[in-house]
Image: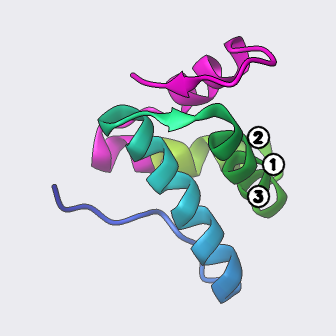
């Protein structure tokens, strides 16, 4: 599947890498599964870069439209897992 990640020209190279890493984690949750700790770490970095809920929603909706992967469902499942070490799969 070919699609582009939604990125901002205002982000540094490191921030772009962290955002792409987050979206790759969402993809991994759908395709193979991902450990909660790994997903949580990538989500925290993403939130440092995109702290605004409205900007997060805009970026993640763009990602979902182009990829078909829902960031919301992955993060919801991650939060529901509690303190357990789990493999998040969709």
Q: Which residue is mark 3?
A: 45
The region drawn magenta spans 63-90
Q: CA distance from mark 2 to mark 3?
A: 14 Å
Query: Crowding near pointer 2: few (<14 within 10 Å), some, many (20+)?
Result: few
Q: Residue at x 44, y 32 (%)?
A: 70
- Report the number of numbered marks: 3
Kind of element beneath mark 3: helix
Q: Which residue is mark 2?
A: 53
Residue 12 % position (x, y) = 70, 86
Give the foreground label among 2 and 3.
3
Query: Crowding near pointer 1: few (<14 within 10 Å), some, many (20+)?
Result: few
Kind of element beneath mark 1: loop
The reply to whether residue 11 is in sight is no
Whichever of callouts 2 and 3 sits on the residue coming sooner in the sequence is: 3
Q: Residue 52: give its label.
A: 1
Residue 50 % position (x, y) = 75, 57
The answer to whether the residue labelled 2 contacts the one labelled 1, judged by CB atoms less than 8 Å apart, is yes
Q: CA distance from mark 1 to mark 3?
A: 13 Å
């Amino acid at each position: 599947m070919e699609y582009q990640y939604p990125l901002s020209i205002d982000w540094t190279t490191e921030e772009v890498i962290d955002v792409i890493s987050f979206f790759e984690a969402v993809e991994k949750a759908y395709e193979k599964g991902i450990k909660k700790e790994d997903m949580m770490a990538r989500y925290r970095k993403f939130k440092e870069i995109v702290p605004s809920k409205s900007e997060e929603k805009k970026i993640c909706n763009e990602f979902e439209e182009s990829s078909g992967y829902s960031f919301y469902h992955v993060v919801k499942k991650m939060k529901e897992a509690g303190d357990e070490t789990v493999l998040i799969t969709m």
